[in-house]
Structure formats: structure tokens, C-alpha cells
Image (cartoon, helix red, strand yellow):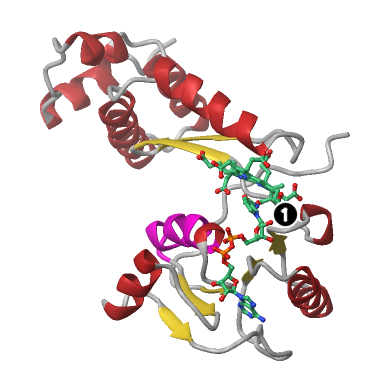
């Protein structure tokens, strides 16, 4: 049943190939660009949005149908053409090269699927139904969006800042673990939600660390 492993992949500066340039390709391409991928699209045609992005140099467009050998140098592949046989051939080449491949027309021909995604700054929530209901995945994602407000963005920036300071200041693993655990118990998130949070100065951060070092 649990066929798919959820992971967070760093594609920054890595070459990702999308075969096809329509509505689905566009929906896969935009998060790839946001994640910093070096995006190459192979397709005889492009949607208006993708075409504008190619024009701005945000992605590379190779204007022709897919041909075997096109996947060389990629770390990730999306077969998003509207031709099942083409998507099948792309998946076959990816398999030979040992590359993860997403197949839009029939997911079972590929090795990974795309979840519904909600972002709040550093927070990412990904929702998958393992392919059972893509629309349901989108709907559940929207429901979760209603539960997780914009305050999570500054909250996670705050946690990141304090965690970085703690990791820098505290060589002892035991003290670090105690501080990081106490960090999670602060009421900062509620304060941010209510708009009463006052940003911590570097002095306040250091004094909080000093006061919370001991058991
Ligand atoms: C397996 C998977 C593989 C993959 O694409 O990675 C897949 C496959 C297929 N989707 C199909 C159809 C639709 N997909 C959507 C929407 C989304 N599809 C997404 C993911 C996934 N879709 C992966 C599973 C995710 C999971 O469940 O865990 C989302 C979540 C993320 C994204 O695409 O970025 C995004 C919502 C984004 C958002 O708004 O939040 C809509 C609704 C719409 O377009 O408005 C429809 C029409 C309604 C319907 O059919 O349900 C078809 C049939 C094609 C046909 O009939 O020809 C297949 C093929 C098949 O089932 O094999
Ligand atoms: N996974 C998903 O979330 C969804 C998947 N689908 C499926 O995804 C496929 C694509 O759907 P859309 O993007 O809506 O279609 P579309 O018609 O908007 O785009 C198809 C694209 O494929 C390109 N193409 C055709 N032959 C090609 C080839 N030989 N090489 C490279 N590119 C080629 C076309 O030029 C076009 O840009 C369909 O098979 C559809 O059933 C549809 C909805 C959602």
C-alpha cells in the first residue's frame, strides 16, 4: 500500500527535463523553477506562460519532439506530453539511466508522483493520495491551508535563527538538545498569530540561551 517514499529533494542548479509543454508541464515546471532547477523543456509547442518564461531566459526550450538520448545530464525527468507512447519511451530511457521519472498520463509507468503542496516560508506541507485522487489531494491541501496561517513563515524564520545560534554556541550535544526542545515550547507562534510578537535582539537571544542551558 505505502509504495511511495516522501522526500524533500534539492534540485538547485541541477538539470531537470520536462517533455511536453502544455498545461500539466506548466504546473510541474513552476515549482521546479521556484526550487532553483535548471529547467529544460523539450516540446514542439509551449503554453503561453511557459513561452514567456522561455523568452525571459528562465528556462531552456528545445522546440522539437522528444528523441532518445535527450535525458543525458538530467537528475530528474517529467514525461508530460499528451502522447502515452512518447511518455512511455521517456520513462524507458529514464529507467535505463537510473533517473527518477514522473509520468503524467499514467503514473504507474513512472517512479515518482507529485503531491499537492502548501508553503509558508520554510514550512512545506505535501499531500499525496498515492495517486488515488489527484483532485482530493488538491482539496485536502486547501483545507490544511486554512489551518496553517501566514504566521508560520516568521515563526520558522525565528526557529531557524535561534537554532543556528544554539548550534554555533553550544558544543555539548546534551545542552543543545535541551535548548532546542525548549525552543519548541515557547509561545512565539501564538504571539505572531496575535501580532504581539516583538523581535528578539541578539542580546535577548544570548540571554535566553544562557538562562536555559541548565536542566
Ligand atoms: C499520480 C499523479 C502523477 C503526477 O502527476 O505527479 C497524477 C496523475 C493524474 N492526474 C490526473 C488528473 C488530474 N490531476 C489534477 C491535479 C493535480 N494532480 C496532481 C498530482 C498527480 N496527478 C499525481 C498524484 C498525486 C496524489 O494523489 O498523490 C497535483 C496534486 C499536483 C501537481 O500536478 O502538481 C495536482 C493538483 C495541484 C493543486 O491544484 O494543488 C486534476 C485537477 C485539476 O487539474 O484541476 C486532474 C483532473 C481530475 C482527475 O482526473 O482527478 C490524471 C488523469 C489524466 C487523464 O484522465 O488523462 C492522472 C494520470 C493517472 O492517474 O495516472
Ligand atoms: N498528472 C496530472 O496531474 C494530469 C495529467 N494529465 C495527462 O497529462 C497529459 C498532458 O496533458 P496537458 O498538459 O493538459 O496536455 P496539453 O495538450 O496542454 O499539452 C501536451 C503537450 O505535449 C507536447 N507534445 C506532444 N507530443 C510531443 C512529443 N513527441 N515530444 C514532446 N512533447 C510533445 C505538446 O506539444 C504539448 O505542449 C495528458 O496525457 C493528460 O491525460 C491531465 C491532467 C492532469
In the image: residue 134, left or right of residue 13: right
What residue is drawn where x is 34% and y is 42%? Answer: 168
Whether label 1 lies within 8 Å of ligand 1 gets the answer: yes
Give how far across and how far down residue 24 sits, in percent: 55, 58
Q: Which residues are magenta?
A: 25-36
What residue is drawn where x is 38% and y is 39%? Answer: 122
Of the 4 image quadrants, the one containing the C terminus is top left
Q: Quadrant of residue 94?
A: bottom right
What residue is drawn where x is 13% and y is 10%? Answer: 196
The picture quadrant for ligand 1 comes to top right
Could you say which is closer to the camera, residue 131 or residue 204?
A: 131
Could you say which is closer to the camera, residue 139 or residue 196?
A: 139
Residue 95 shows in this picture: yes
Give how far across and how far down residue 144 sits, in percent: 49, 21
In the image: residue 25, left or right of residue 95: left
Q: Is residue 128 magenta?
A: no
Circle 1 is placed at which residue position?
A: 112
Is 30 placed above or below 56 here? above
Q: Main secondary structure of the magenta part?
A: helix
What residue is drawn where x is 39% and y is 13%? Answer: 214
Q: SS at mark 1?
A: loop
Q: Quadrant of residue 5?
A: top right
Of the 4 image quadrants, the one containing the N terminus is top right
Amino acid at each position: 500500500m505505502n509504495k511511495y517514499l516522501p522526500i524533500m529533494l534539492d534540485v538547485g542548479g541541477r538539470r531537470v527535463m520536462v517533455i511536453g509543454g502544455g498545461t500539466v508541464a506548466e504546473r510541474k515546471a513552476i515549482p521546479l523553477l521556484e526550487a532553483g532547477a535548471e529547467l529544460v523543456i523539450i516540446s514542439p509547442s509551449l503554453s503561453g506562460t511557459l513561452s514567456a518564461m522561455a523568452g525571459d531566459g528562465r528556462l531552456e526550450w528545445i522546440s522539437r519532439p522528444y528523441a532518445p538520448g535527450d535525458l543525458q545530464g538530467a537528475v530528474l525527468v517529467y514525461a508530460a506530453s499528451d502522447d502515452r507512447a512518447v511518455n512511455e519511451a521517456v520513462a524507458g530511457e529514464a529507467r535505463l539511466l537510473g533517473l527518477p521519472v514522473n509520468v503524467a498520463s499514467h503514473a504507474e509507468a513512472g517512479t515518482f508522483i507529485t503531491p499537492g503542496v502548501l508553503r509558508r516560508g520554510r514550512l512545506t506541507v505535501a499531500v499525496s493520495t498515492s495517486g488515488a485522487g489527484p483532485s482530493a489531494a488538491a482539496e485536502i491541501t486547501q483545507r490544511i491551508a486554512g489551518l496553517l496561517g501566514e504566521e508560520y513563515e516568521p515563526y520558522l524564520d525565528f526557529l531557524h535563527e535561534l537554532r543556528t545560534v544554539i548550534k554555533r554556541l553550544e558544543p555539548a550535544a546534551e545542552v543543545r538538545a535541551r535548548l532546542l526542545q525548549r525552543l519548541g515550547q515557547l509561545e512565539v507562534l501564538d504571539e505572531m498569530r496575535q501580532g504581539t510578537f516583538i523581535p528578539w535582539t541578539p542580546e535577548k537571544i544570548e540571554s535566553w540561551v544562557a538562562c536555559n542551558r541548565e536542566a
